[in-house]
Image (spheres, helix red, strand yellow):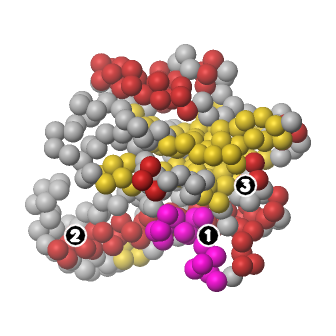
Amino acid sequence: MTTPFRIGTFNLENLDDENPAQLQKRIDVLRPMIERIRADLLFLQEVNSLPALEELLDGTLYQQEQFAIATTRTTAGEPYKKRNLVTVSRHPIAAVHQYRHSLVSPPMWRKVTSVPPETEAKQITWERPVLHCEVSLGGSRILHAINIHLKSKNPRDIPGQKRSMYVWKSHEGWAEGSFLSSVARVGQALEVRRLLEQIFSPDPRSAVIAVGGDFNADIDSVPFKVIVGSIEDTNNPDLRSTALIPCEFHIPKEHRFSLIHRGKGDMLDHVAVSGCLYPFWRGTDIFNELLPDESIAFATDVTYPESDHAPVIATFDLPDDWLP
């Protein structure tokens, strides 16, 4: 016998409680989506306020059935002021870890287009850690649930190279900002891959792993390939056991998108699993039917209180002895 098991990821787009009236408007449109997801394991991104999340989940199955919750925290043990990762699990969370430059040291770079010029190289850091939860399943199995939010594609600021928030003074300034953004995104992906190698190392074929989140990267990008693994790029079939399986390729390309930017659909949010989960995968849904394009003129958060990302949900039929 088997039991359905759903793994979902959803970027809530800066969920906060700074404006109670606006929060209520957001809850009115977000809660039906949260209830539709019906995940047993849910990866959330961009949670700026845990009380706001609690209010959003109030009355849903996640609150009624007392799902376990884990979140990213600062060195002081407090949630970050913005863009926290939160993992919500039907089954107990036995341990929580997070990684930010603990597996990959910050690279060094001296900005070449800054005004005035930089004289010394500085660290390129990334702001968001990786959230790794060990979820207890049946038969002493541990599901390694890895929640990620990679750096956006927006260029990093270069001193003296911007007229305003969105207006650059030169092509080279924009280019260097984009380069540094890419370095941070790939660096985060490398940290995730190094974590995966540690989890796989005892026995790759028995490691139960699910990675989900906002990759800010599509399936052909370097960050995506770094995390998932690419036999085509390594040219080594012996590495197949430590590659992940993206749970989305069966979706027709015209429907495979989780964000719309300037009229074009992009698949930036993903769920990928280890080989031992793959036999039980039954399908994936992307709830993008009502997804707004917030890049167009006048598309403010007031106009569109929902998220600009669509949830992605992968469904599995797990053997009953896998579950508590």
Provide the secondary structure element on which disc 2 rests.
helix
Q: Is residue 207 magenta?
A: no
Q: Residue at x 13, y 60 (%)?
A: 167
Determine whether 90 is above or below 259 in the image.
Answer: above
Q: Residues within 10 Å of mark 3 (few under 14, many from 20)?
A: some
Q: Position of residue 84 (x, y in %)?
A: 47, 42
Q: Position of residue 18 (x, y in %)?
A: 32, 27
Q: Quadrant of the C terminus?
A: top right
Let me know if residue 51 appears in the view: no
Amino acid type shown at disc 3: Tyr
Among the two numbered marks 2 and 3 on one chain, the one whose residue lies closer to the N terminus: 2
Residue at which label 2 appears: 174
Q: Is residue 220 magenta?
A: yes
Report the span colored magenta: 219-235
Residue at which label 1 appears: 229
State the residue in front, 9 or 191: 9
Q: Nearer the viewer, mark 3 or mark 1?
A: 3
Q: Residue at x 30, y 23 (%)?
A: 22
State the residue in front, 9 or 16: 9
Among the two numbered marks 3 and 1 on one chain, the one whose residue lies closer to the N terminus: 1
Determine whether 167 is above or below 230 in the image.
Answer: above
Does the magenta stretch mainly form a helix, a strand or a loop?
A: helix
Provide the secondary structure element on which disc 1 rests.
loop
| Mark 2 vs 1: CB contact within 8 A | no
Let me know if residue 261 appears in the view: yes
